[in-house]
Image (cartoon, rainbow, N blue to C red):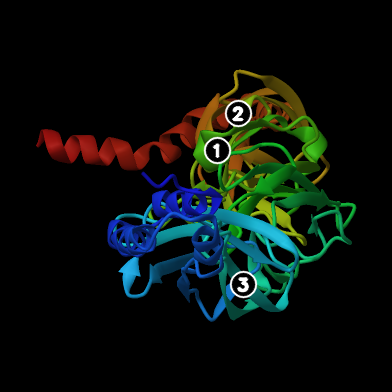
Amino acid sequence: MVWPNSGERRVAAGRRRLGPRVLLLAAAVGVGVALLGGSPALAATKQKVAPHIVVNIALTAPASVSTGSPIAVSVLVSSSGYPVVNHLIRFYAAGLYLGAAKTNSSGYAATKLRQALPVGSQTLIATYKGGGPVESARASRTILVVPAPLTIRVVPYVPGAVAVSINGGAPVSPNSGGYINQNLPVGGHVTLQAVLQNPAANERISFVSWSNGDTSTTRVLTDRAHAYTQLAVQVAYLTRLKFVTAAGRPVPASQLTGVTLTGPDGTHVAVSDPSAVWLSTPAPRRTASGALSVGNDTYTAVTGYYDGVNVVNQGRDRFTPGPTGAWTVALNIYPVSLFSRNVVLGSQVPAKVALTGPGSQTRLISLPQRGLATLTLPRGHYSVKLKGGGFGPGLKFRVSGASSVPIPIVTPLDIAGGVVVILLLIGGLLALGPWRRRVVAWVFAGDLRERRASQS
């Protein structure tokens, strides 16, 4: 019996690592050597002529790849045309170990290498360690690593308000379309930091979220092949409010109370200072395409009380806030002229009247020497009563536009004059004495003739 020496044991180890057909070939060679004899000299000769098994690696990899993106590689490992089965193939580039893959029954192995490579031309190497009679093997391929594109969209775009720091670098501002486009020369995770500032005294910027719903101003991107994200902000504008009558005449804000507005998504705004208010754009929302969009950002006035009456055109006055915003709100307030009219002489005389409006508030108004007073009144029904300067009936009227309202009046002088005229007539009749009957008969002669004619 011939005992296998150490060289044969190495061959046996190589057999275990190779595929079945290669192992059969190695076995045949070993048997032939054993049949030649078992002397020590022959054993020494047998070690010198022990076969060396050569392994070939066919490596497949992309010609170029973005830094940080996975590199899809595959190998086909064979020896003398036979597959090398269940052996580990390791991959290297730029002095870095990238990963490994084990061959299947066909000698094929594939994997994705996720270790980031520097930008530039890199040599990818696939290696097989070998052992015993099986020689080590390697294959290489040149790939071009290009910068990875990064796109950040700011919604809405506000000039000078938002910038983004990438991997701790200097903040980068978006272009006029609201986009930040950068090439990343280094792979790995990308850390983004939103940097906000108020571009003007009448503008306020607040961070809402990233497009993935993260409400922190810092976000880490792990998709390094083509990174894309969106950044949502809200901007508030200090809006000056100007109130005018229906005729366009200014109404002091101090004369208004209870001013309220409704904004996007039913937002209710109570205006504490009717001269100015901060109005915000709505928070951006995701559309069906995945893009963020700012929806309806209009505001409308709901209430505003003047003399206790809501004078706002509800739902009609609309406004979209902006950097140079000034909102002019037209109110249901109209100029109304009140004047007295002497029923005797038709002239205007001074008087005092009590005016009661739709807010159930009554105020005393003095009509000057010419009897004319121009007021600014909210729309509604009114009543007027004379309180001084004469006598007259109560008057009711409705204000729905610019108008003039005459107030009939009889002054004490008119009454005194009428009394004087009556007394003079009576005194004249008494002064006629015996001529009274003739005068009376002459005055009423026409009536007497008509009565006689009708009786006949």
Of badges 1 and 3, the one in the foreground is 3
Tell me the amino acid under the disc marked 1. Arg
- Residue position marked by numbered label 2 in the rendering: 309
Q: Which mark is residue 379?
A: 1
Q: Residue at x 55, y 38 (%)?
A: 379
Nearest the camera: 452 or 215?
A: 215
What is the crowding at mark 2: few (fewer than 14 residues within 10 Å), some, or many (at least 20)?
Answer: many
Of badges 2 and 3, the one in the foreground is 3
Tell me how far mark 2 sits from mark 3, CA to CA: 82 Å
What is the crowding at mark 1: few (fewer than 14 residues within 10 Å), some, or many (at least 20)?
Answer: many
The quadrant of the image that shows the C terminus is top left
Is disc 1 placed on a helix, strand or loop?
Answer: loop
Tell me the amino acid under the disc marked 3. Leu
Residue 72 horizontal/vertical position (percent): 48, 65
Nearest the camera: 226 or 90?
A: 90
Of badges 1 and 2, the one in the foreground is 2
The quadrant of the image that shows the N terminus is top left
Please tell me whether residue 370 is drawn above or below residue 454 in the rendered image.
below
Q: Is residue 60 visible?
A: yes
Residue 250 horizontal/vertical position (percent): 76, 51
Please tell me whether residue 51 is drawn above or below residue 15 in the rendered image.
below
Q: Which mark is residue 124?
A: 3
Say if mark 1 contacts mark 2, CB within 8 Å. yes
